[in-house]
Image (tube, grey):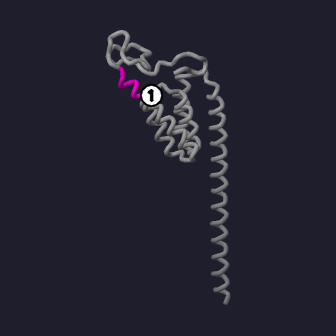
Amino acid sequence: MINSVGEVINMYSCPACGKEDVTGQITCIRCGTDLSLLKTLDSVADAWFNRALKEIDDGNSGRAIQWLSACCAARPMDAEALRIRAKVWGMLGHWKEARYSLEEAREIDPDALELKEIESALQVMEKQHEEKLQEERLMGKVSLKTVRRSTRRKKNKKKRK
């Protein structure tokens, strides 16, 4: 995988000898270990990532989180999946999880242009969410007071008669 400035990101190491950057290889150059399972895992992670994108397009953010989380578990150095997962967590209103995913992505690919864009979008979404909650709280208090007042008026009318 290549980061935002064109550097290759090491996705997998050889499980036998620890040689880095064996992504896409069938056998380890250093020790000869069969790496076909890693290649299969990489293909599965790609499929999970693509499924997450489809779920996002279909408006299924919760399902997208599941697929992105599976992708990130299989491929923990996938900064793009982490950035998208941060966006989706933000869409769901889970700010702590969104920021955590964004920080993970920043550690892997600190020069990605999307980081500031996503961070700004998360701030806007969080502010809008807080404003909406505040408005709902105010509306709830107003309607509750209105109900209490109208109930009192009815009781007072009955007492007067």
The one nearer the camera, 148 or 115, is 115
Amino acid bearing label 1: Arg
- Image vertical order of residue 133 relative to residue 52, above or below: below
Residue 153 lies, in percent from the top left, at 67, 78
Which residue is denoted by mark 1 in the rendering? Answer: 75
- Total numbered labels placed on residues in the image: 1
Give the residues in magenta: 35-41
Residue drawn at the location 38% of the way across and 18% of the way down: 26
Q: Residue furthest bottom?
A: 161
Residue 129 lies, in percent from the top left, at 63, 47
The one nearer the camera, 107 or 15, is 15
**Would residue 96 be seen by someone viewing this image from the given angle?**
no
Q: Quadrant of residue 156?
A: bottom right
The one nearer the camera, 47 or 7, is 47
Residue 71 lies, in percent from the top left, at 46, 33
Residue drawn at the location 66% of the way across and 46% of the way down: 128
Q: Residue furthest top?
A: 30
Residue 151 lies, in percent from the top left, at 63, 76
Residue drawn at the location 47% of the way across and 18% of the way down: 10
- Image vertical order of residue 145 relative to residue 53, above or below: below
**Would residue 156 be seen by someone viewing this image from the given angle?**
yes
Inspect the magenta stretch and tell me whether residue 39 lies in it.
yes
Inspect the magenta stretch and tell me whether residue 27 lies in it.
no
Mark 1 lies on a secondary structure that is loop
